[in-house]
Amino acid sequence: MAEIRPKSRMRGPARKALITAAALELFASKGYHATSLGEIAAEAGVSRTVMYDHFPSKRVLLLAVMQEQNAALVEHVGARITGMGPPEDRMRSTIDAYFSFAQSSPSARRLLFDRTDEDDPEIRTVRQGIRQSRTRAVAALLGSDMRTVGVDPGEPIAEAMVELVITGLDGVAQWWERDPGMSRSVLVEGAMRLLWRGLGHAQ
């Protein structure tokens, strides 16, 4: 007779990852207020008690997911910004990185850029903080390239320029989500025509 072994328990980090993954999908598709903790627990396949072990409230869970996904975005794009090669190649690679993030992680993109939940002051404040930290992080990564076009990365205008690029690329990503027939490579080349031509005249 075969020995019956007890089922192994999932470790805490693995359970937490299931919860945040489920929360990401539900928050992105339904919004913060329309999503219940019970739905998230069911989607993650854990009990509400287990979920509360990791996240004491829905607000804490939302903020944790936003922070997690923002860090993933900055890391994904930042690796291309600071990569090898001439500035034009790195810009093309960076644009492609953002579009690839939007393509592979549509729920993360929607949560970070589309969902606002502006009626909650705490969420609004944290969301704005995340946005500012993302802009500053990208501005710092672009520091050497900005200096080549005569912009000090420490100037306020530097953050404004980065915000323009991020918002513009995300606008294209939103359009692409509504009309997904165009290839990513065509989008990248279209963005390069505008962005690199502008930077080229500034040099």
Image (cartoon, rainbow, N blue to C red):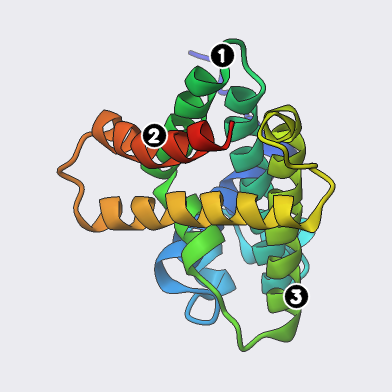
Residue drawn where x is 53% and y is 49% of the image:
165
Which numbered disc covers residue 192? 2
Mark 3 or mark 2, which is nearer to you?
Answer: 2
Q: 42 above or below 103?
A: below
Labelled pair 3, 2 in contact (Cβ < 8 Å): no
Q: Nearer the viewer, residue 162 or 101?
A: 162
SS label for mark 1: loop
Mark 2 neighbour class, 10 Å CA radius: few under 14, some 14 to 19, many 20 or more: some
Quarter of the image for residue 52 reads: bottom right
Say whether residue 45 is visible.
no
Given the image, on which type of amino acid does mark 2 rest?
A: Met
Q: Which residue is mark 3?
A: 125
Q: Which mark is residue 86?
A: 1
Q: Secondary structure at mark 3?
A: helix
Callout 2: SS: helix
- Check disc 1: other Cα within 10 Å, few if <14, some if 14-19, many if 20+: few
Foreground: disc 3 or disc 1: 1
Q: Earlier in the sequence, mark 2 or mark 1?
A: 1
Residue 94, image x, y percentages: 52, 30
Q: Quadrant of residue 153?
A: top right
User: Where is residue 91 shown, x and y percent of the image?
Assistant: 51, 28
Give the CA distance from mark 3 to mark 1.
38 Å
Q: In the image, what residue type sits under mark 1?
A: Pro
Q: Could you tell me how far apart the alpha carbons at marks 3 and 2 are, in whole angstroms?
A: 33 Å
